[in-house]
Amino acid sequence: MSNPDKNIDPRLIASAKAEFLEKGYLKAELKTICENADITTGALYKRYKGKEDLFCAVVKDIADELTDFVKQRRAVDLSAFTDEQICSLWTMTYETMLPLFKMLYDSRDSFALLIGKAAGTRYEDFSHGYVTEMSYAYVQYYSEARRRGLAEAKVTREEFHVLLSSFWTCICEPFIHGMSWNKIKEHCHTVCRFFNWKDVIMLKEGTENV
């Protein structure tokens, strides 16, 4: 039995990524992907069911990382937090935000495909779904702050969804426009100044950990 060519998969993924970035999912051609990877279409179909399956393979890792990112935050037992810790969660800092930007930058091509070129695939509504999950997480944290009398504003989940849609756009746009890492680091500072979540929920004066 012949050994499978292990060089095919990285060549195929790299070629697919380039084709999808240039043309988007709908206009990308498997023939071109195979030619640029120097493989046959038969070799592709031994590995993937078709174009959508190949696209999803390119973006799956970053999509899974982001999904896990939100799941971990929703799994936190807030009842074990002190009031001071609850308040500190609403202070968005450069140090807490930069790791997210770094994670996305390390997978910037796949992330750009996920958020901007996925029309026609099962990931085409990823951003909307991700914002929805974020809104549930924020409501969870907000509800605990309200229960303890730390947040004075009444904010609905729908309102959080609207605000987080804007927040998510601010995270995504640097990658859609191909900003350099240095520019993204500057952008991270700006985002932290722009989104003042303490004011959104009207965190009580003197309770925040600053």
Image: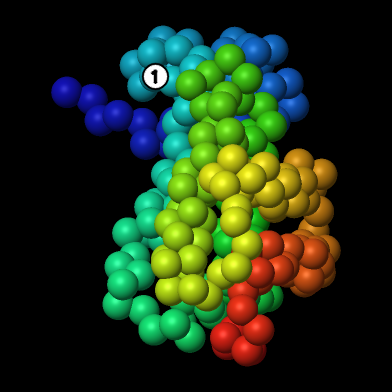
Tell me: residue 208, above or below residue 178.
below
Residue found 52% across the figure and 75% down from its top: 150
Tell me: residue 21, above or below residue 166.
above
Q: How is the image coloured?
A: rainbow
Tell me: residue 166, above or below residue 125.
below
**Residue extending furthest left?**
1
Q: In screen coordinates, is 59 left or right of 175?
A: left
Which amino acid is tagged 1?
A: Tyr
Q: Position of residue 128 (x, y in %)?
A: 58, 33
Q: Position of residue 202 (x, y in %)?
A: 66, 69
* Residue 197 position by quadrant: bottom right
The residue under label 1 is: 48
Q: Which is nearer the eye, 23 or 170?
A: 170
Residue found 67% across the figure and 27% down from its top: 117
Residue found 62% across the figure and 74% down from its top: 203
Q: In screen coordinates, is 98 left or right of 157?
A: right
In the rendered image, the quadrant that contains the C terminus is: bottom right
